[in-house]
Amino acid sequence: MTYSVMSLFAGVGGIDLGFEMTGAFKTVWANEFDKNAAITYQENFENELVVEDIHNLNPDDVPDVDVLLAGFPCQAFSVAGYRKGFEDERGDLFFETLRFIKEKQPQVVFLENVKNLVGHDNGNTFRVIHEALEYHGYHVKYQVLNAKDYGNIPQNRERIYIVGFKDREAYKNFDFPNPVPLTTKLTDVIDFTSKIEDKFYYTEDKYAFYPKLNEAIISQDTVYQWRRQYVRANKSNVVPTLTANMGTGGHNVPLILSDNGIRKLTPKECFNVQGYPEDYKLPEMAISHLYKQAGNSVVVPVIYRIAQNILEAIEESKMNTSKSKQQVELFSI
């Protein structure tokens, strides 16, 4: 059986992709506000995508689905943001998500956000979200997972994942994935050997702070960042958390020592670091947009592993329900 999926704040489709990789979930309708992200999404998915502000959408115009996905924008809850939470105008996007949940009543709700959501406003923000889902009939489990521990992806990226089930049996059956060893190397997602376009390299003639880079960036086992005044080395042999402003604020761009000089990661490498498959298409557009899309996205293998467990929980519940019905029928004969 294939379960129908609605995707809110779809971005470039990372959550959709993780669910569809199970072979049992299929996105039938999606919404995204950012026109450039929508272009990338449409390069890779064939389902209907409505490019519009969610405030202007009517749930009655959207098909009924089994599963609702929402990686609602997280800036209002991010450590890097202003920490205003629901007071920030972006904080109300959870309530827009809730509007669709309330009207469509999907069997499963899957939400993704920044780790800081849990502790924001002494836990009050998350409490509101948790209680709102329960009020509308969902049994909720949540966990903070790091990509390097749960996705076999060399990126230090912690996110909270929230799963709500209408069916209590499926809720009981569901567990988040166990940790897995990190066997994917930096060289599996980053090309240290090939000569690429000059625009990605840092050189003495282009950057006044190049001597500081040259002094500090000494190992191909480490990914670095220029932090305005100094070089930060990520010594755990993983990529630091990718951010949406990588392409605009130079201090946020992950840097490496390639065989051809010091350079920043390419957009394609950033998508690799998010676990996107090799055949995922990146359209021709300004690289700042692609950096933003990668930084705003999710680690696909983590999503896939959670989706796989959701599927098993649903299927086990259905199987047990079927057995119970058969037993009742036998006793009634």
Image (spheres, rainbow, N blue to C red):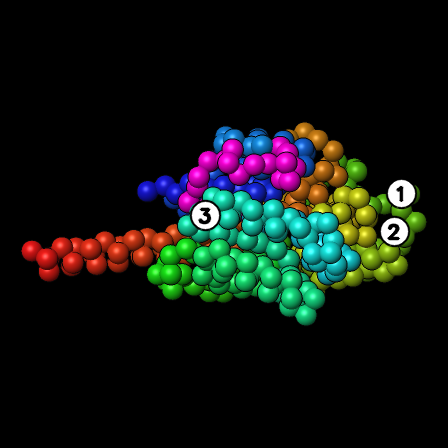
Local packing at callout 3 (Cα closer than 10 Å; few below 14, some 14-19, many 20+) is many
Task: Using residue 58 as the reference point, say whether residue 235 is left or right of it.
Answer: right
Residue visible at 46% across and 58% down in the picture: 138
Q: In the rendered image, which quarter is residue 240 located in? A: bottom right
Give above or below for 198 relative to 184: above
Task: Using residue 216 as the reference point, say whether residue 281 is left or right of it.
Answer: left
Dots 2 and 1: beta carbons under 8 Å? yes
Give above or below for 291 relative to 257: above
Give above or below for 205 relative to 257: above
Q: Nearer the viewer, residue 37 or 62?
A: 62
Q: In the rendered image, which quarter is residue 153 located in? A: bottom right
Q: Which residues are magenta?
A: 51-69
Give above or below for 199 relative to 95: above
Q: For the residue labelled by badge 2, is the local secondary structure a helix, a strand or a loop?
A: helix
Please identify, in this view, whether the residue under mark 3 or under mark 2 is nearer the observer: 3
Q: Nearer the viewer, residue 253 or 24?
A: 24
- Which corner quadrant holds the N terminus? top left
Q: What numbered label is drawn on residue 210?
A: 2
What residue sits right under mark 1 in the picture?
206
Q: Position of residue 327 (x, y in %)?
A: 15, 59
Tell me which amino acid carries mark 3. Answer: Gln
